[in-house]
């Protein structure tokens, strides 16, 4: 399939939906598509007058806001390369990314700016506040940058003397393999690398979303942006698709706690929900499971005549929690707990689990909720191929390889890592282990870097042990590590459940020993856990809420 200019699609959508609401900072200001277009043109003037050329890097760092999204769109439609940076990165990481990317300008949010040291980013020519006051200039190191900001309104008036209209838009025409985004990963197993994402990958992911959702999402429909837009999962499916569809994106701009999210879902009733497993699991465990455990409900679930009715009521409660207006919830970013997935399938809840990576911007696998096979992550997405590097891919796990239009160009200024990840035939080596059935459904077994080796050479997938351990009483989060020839479970206990149960520290330790005994009854002999150690605080996570496993491999046990 021929790949059109991605910017031409943005341009058409903005023109077609000129008077519709485009972006809202939840609970505050709203920008219509014509407002977005006007601000994009002003930013184009700033970029041009500042001396930014096509292909130069522009960094954007901050919480999700409308201004963040507009700065990103302005960078792409000018022909510069966007460098979105997660605001949750440590300041030193942000400094390093700005320097490594060779960014000329930085648009930074109010929360991040006080933590940064401009002297540690000497290559920047200008730093702008990415807030609601017309991109205030914080630091201008060249006369061009200062001139651009000081004379912006005059320059805009000179360019559009007869008022700015839809017909005045004319965006940069990109080519498929041209670099569009330099996205620094927040992986669970290593330090960040600059993933070079071409325009074709952006287009292919957005086109995939159009194929899947256009029958259900209409222009003007509400979408809640939960995930960081600096992460490709949120960028592709909570922002770029919606802009090209003419939908209305509501950006939370705050920590997406279950309380905040459930209120937003209730207020906005989104047509699609993009989520990570942790969110779904918390809703189920805290809002649904306690009610199911009531004696009357448990009895009804065991009674054939009542079971279907009870399940339907539970399904309705789940749908209502997420706004009761969505076609499906697409879950990605990490593995779903097995017990939660069985429960959701049992009530025929309309969710599906996708699989992707930053290196594929991000989608690799998907299946719609009504065709999704429990335990899988779907089949190869459109314009993508998948194979398992195994002699028996249906039964013996091997590395998952992906090839197609979504795949990155490589890692920026890192030929060695690129050569290790992209082979000569164009296959992207994901580092994930999985199997694939005869219908093409992919089942992930774990990360190849996480795989442990038993004393007799058995392959041990810690994620499979963790899945079972996390379903046991009082376990909120867990990681399984190996020391010598023994396995240990690191557990962060659910503080609310511990409080409700009135457990003393000694009683909690006793409960963890009971959990260990129960766990060892249901795992293979070589995967038995020697001991469980309680963690004093939650595990450190990436913005998509995956535990940073590499930080705990040497945890003292």
Image (cartoon, helix red, strand yellow):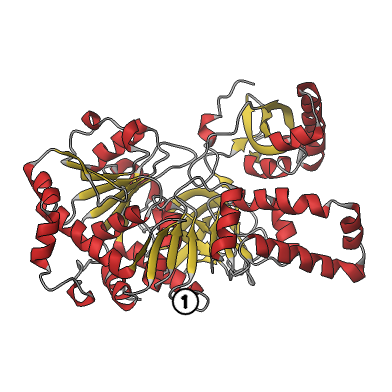
Residue 456 in the image: above or below residue 299: above
Residue 234 in the image: above or below residue 327: above
Does residue 243 show up?
Answer: yes
Does residue 77 show up?
Answer: no
- Please give the name of the residue rendered at 59% of the width and 55% of the height, measured from the top-left corner: 263
Residue pointed to by mark 1: 218
Find residue 82 and report its horizontal and vertical position in percent: 28, 52
Is 196 placed left or right of 352 in the picture? left
Q: Nearer the viewer, residue 60 or 210?
A: 60
Residue 455 in the image: above or below residue 459: above
Image quadrant where one finds the C terminus = top right
Is 534 placed left or right of 250 in the picture? right
Image quadrant where one finds the N terminus = bottom left
Q: Nearer the viewer, residue 462 or 55?
A: 55
Find residue 286 and report its horizontal and vertical position in percent: 71, 48
Identify the secondary structure beneath mark 1.
loop
Q: Quadrant of residue 46?
A: bottom left
Q: Quadrant of residue 512?
A: top right
- Please give the name of the residue rendered at 18% of the width and 51% of the height, measured from the top-left corner: 56
Is 62 placed left or right of 352 in the picture? left
Q: Quadrant of residue 111?
A: top left
Q: Nearer the viewer, residue 484 or 20?
A: 20
Is 441 placed left or right of 192 in the picture? right
Crowd band around label 1 with a 10 angstrom C-alpha radius: few (<14), some (14–19), many (20+): some
Q: Nearer the viewer, residue 428 or 135?
A: 135
- Please give the name of the residue rendered at 86% of the width and 52% of the height, measured from the top-left corner: 294
Find residue 410 and report its horizontal and vertical position in percent: 32, 51
> Hey, which residue is sitting farthest front in the picture?
28
Find residue 480 and report its horizontal and vertical position in percent: 64, 34
């Amino acid at each position: 399939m021929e790949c059109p200019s991605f910017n031409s699609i943005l341009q058409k959508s903005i023109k077609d939906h000129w008077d519709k609401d485009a972006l809202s900072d939840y609970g505050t200001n709203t920008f219509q598509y014509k407002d977005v277009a006007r601000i994009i043109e002003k930013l184009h003037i700033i970029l041009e007058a500042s001396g930014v050329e096509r292909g130069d890097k522009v960094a954007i760092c901050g919480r999700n806001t409308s201004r963040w999204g507009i700065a990103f769109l302005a960078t792409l439609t000018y022909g510069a390369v966007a460098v979105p940076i997660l605001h949750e990165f440590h300041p030193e990481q942000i400094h390093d990314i700005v320097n490594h990317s060779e960014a000329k300008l930085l648009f930074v949010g109010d929360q991040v700016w006080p933590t940064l040291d401009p002297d540690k980013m000497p290559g920047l020519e200008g730093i702008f506040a990415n807030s609601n006051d017309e991109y205030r200039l914080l630091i201008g190191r060249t006369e061009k940058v200062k001139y651009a900001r000081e004379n912006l309104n005059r320059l805009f008036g000179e360019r559009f003397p007869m008022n700015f209209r839809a017909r005045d838009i004319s965006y940069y025409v990109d080519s498929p393999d041209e670099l569009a985004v330099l996205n620094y990963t927040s992986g669970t197993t290593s330090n960040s690398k600059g993933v070079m994402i071409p325009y074709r990958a952006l287009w292919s992911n957005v086109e995939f979303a159009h194929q899947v959702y256009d029958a259900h999402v209409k222009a003007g429909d509400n979408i809640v942006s939960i995930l960081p837009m600096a992460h490709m999962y949120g960028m592709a499916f909570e922002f770029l698709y919606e802009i090209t569809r003419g939908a209305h994106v509501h950006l939370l701009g705050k920590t997406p706690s279950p309380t905040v999210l459930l209120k937003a879902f209730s207020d906005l009733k989104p047509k699609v929900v993009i989520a990570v497993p942790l969110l779904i699991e918390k809703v189920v465990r805290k809002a649904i499971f306690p009610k199911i455990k009531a004696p009357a409900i448990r009895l009804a679930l065991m009674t054939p005549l009542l079971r279907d009715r009870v399940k339907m009521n539970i399904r309705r409660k789940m749908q209502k929690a997420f706004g009761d207006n969505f076609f499906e919830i697409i879950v990605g970013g990490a593995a779903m707990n097995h017990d939660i997935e069985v429960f959701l399938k049992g009530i025929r809840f309309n969710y599906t689990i996708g699989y992707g990576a930053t290196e594929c911007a991000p989608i690799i696998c998907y299946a719609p909720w009504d065709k999704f096979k429990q335990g899988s992550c779907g089949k190869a997405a459109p314009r993508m191929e998948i194979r398992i590097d195994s002699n028996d891919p249906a039964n013996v796990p091997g590395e998952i390889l992906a090839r197609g239009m979504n795949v990155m160009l490589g890692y920026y200024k890192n030929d060695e890592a690129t050569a290790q990840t992209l082979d000569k035939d164009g296959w992207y080596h994901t580092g994930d282990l999985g199997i694939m059935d005869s219908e093409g459904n992919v089942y992930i077994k774990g990360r190849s870097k996480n795989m442990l080796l038993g004393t007799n050479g058995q392959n041990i997938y810690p994620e499979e042990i963790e899945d079972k351990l996390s379903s046991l009483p009082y376990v909120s989060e867990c990681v399984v590590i190996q020391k010598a020839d023994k396995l240990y479970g690191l557990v962060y206990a659910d503080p609310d459940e511990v409080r409700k149960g009135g457990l003393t520290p000694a009683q909690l330790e006793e409960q963890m020993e009971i959990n260990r005994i129960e766990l060892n009854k249901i795992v293979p002999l070589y995967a038995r856990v020697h001991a469980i150690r309680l963690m004093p605080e939650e595990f450190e996570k990436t913005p998509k809420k995956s535990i940073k496993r590499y930080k705990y491999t040497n945890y003292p046990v």
